[in-house]
Image: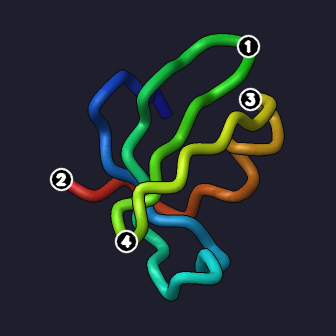
Amino acid sequence: MEYKIGDIVQTRKTHPCGENKWEIIRVGVDFKLKCLGCGHVITVAREKVLKMIKSKVN
Protein backbone atom coordinates (compact mmCIF):
# COMPACT_ATOMS: atom_id res chain seq x y z
CA MET A 1 0.00 0.00 0.00
CA GLU A 2 1.22 3.50 -0.81
CA TYR A 3 1.47 6.02 2.01
CA LYS A 4 1.99 9.76 1.61
CA ILE A 5 2.35 12.76 3.87
CA GLY A 6 -0.93 13.72 5.52
CA ASP A 7 -2.45 10.21 5.48
CA ILE A 8 -4.16 9.06 8.68
CA VAL A 9 -3.42 5.45 9.65
CA GLN A 10 -4.75 3.18 12.38
CA THR A 11 -2.27 1.00 14.30
CA ARG A 12 -2.79 -2.44 15.81
CA LYS A 13 -1.81 -1.33 19.32
CA THR A 14 -2.99 1.84 21.04
CA HIS A 15 -0.68 4.61 22.21
CA PRO A 16 -0.52 5.07 26.02
CA CYS A 17 -2.83 8.10 25.65
CA GLY A 18 -5.55 5.74 24.35
CA GLU A 19 -5.51 6.77 20.67
CA ASN A 20 -4.63 4.45 17.79
CA LYS A 21 -4.82 6.94 14.90
CA TRP A 22 -1.64 8.61 13.61
CA GLU A 23 -0.88 11.22 10.94
CA ILE A 24 2.06 10.56 8.64
CA ILE A 25 4.42 13.55 8.70
CA ARG A 26 7.38 12.09 6.78
CA VAL A 27 7.83 9.15 4.41
CA GLY A 28 11.13 7.60 3.39
CA VAL A 29 13.48 5.04 4.91
CA ASP A 30 11.93 6.16 8.22
CA PHE A 31 8.35 7.22 8.85
CA LYS A 32 7.58 10.12 11.18
CA LEU A 33 4.17 9.73 12.82
CA LYS A 34 2.15 12.16 14.97
CA CYS A 35 -0.38 10.82 17.47
CA LEU A 36 -3.79 12.42 16.91
CA GLY A 37 -4.64 12.07 20.60
CA CYS A 38 -1.75 13.79 22.39
CA GLY A 39 0.42 15.15 19.55
CA HIS A 40 3.45 12.98 20.38
CA VAL A 41 5.80 12.56 17.37
CA ILE A 42 7.80 9.38 16.76
CA THR A 43 10.24 8.24 14.07
CA VAL A 44 10.12 4.54 13.17
CA ALA A 45 11.87 2.42 10.52
CA ARG A 46 9.75 1.74 7.41
CA GLU A 47 9.60 -2.06 7.81
CA LYS A 48 8.46 -1.75 11.43
CA VAL A 49 5.77 0.82 10.55
CA LEU A 50 4.39 -1.39 7.78
CA LYS A 51 3.90 -4.17 10.36
CA MET A 52 2.26 -1.90 12.97
CA ILE A 53 -0.26 -0.28 10.58
CA LYS A 54 -3.67 -1.94 10.59
CA SER A 55 -5.48 0.21 8.03
CA LYS A 56 -5.59 3.58 6.30
CA VAL A 57 -8.36 5.94 7.44
CA ASN A 58 -9.91 8.22 4.80
Instruction: For marks 2 and 3, give the CA distance.
Output: 21 Å
Q: Foreground: 3 or 22?
A: 22
Q: Residue furthest left?
A: 58
Label annotation for residue 37? 4
Secondary structure beneath dot 2 equals loop
Secondary structure beneath dot 4 equals loop
Q: Foreground: 32 or 56?
A: 32
Comparing labels 2 and 4, the label whose residue is closer to the camera: 4
Residue at position x 28%, y 58% in the image:
57
Q: Foreground: 36 or 1?
A: 36
Q: Position of residue 5 (x, y in %)?
A: 35, 23
Label annotation for residue 29? 1
The amino acid type, in three-letter code, at marker 3 is Arg
Classify 10 Å Cα crowding around label 3: few (below 14), some (14-19), many (20 and above).
Answer: some
Callout 1 touching callout 2 (CB < 8 Å): no
Write down the residue under mark 3.
46
Work out whether 29 lies above or below 50.
Answer: above
The amino acid type, in three-letter code, at marker 2 is Asn
Q: Is residue 52 left or right of residue 48?
A: left
Callout 2 touching callout 4 (CB < 8 Å): no
Residue at position x 46%, y 47% in the image:
34
Work out whether 30 lies above or below 37.
Answer: above
Label annotation for residue 58? 2
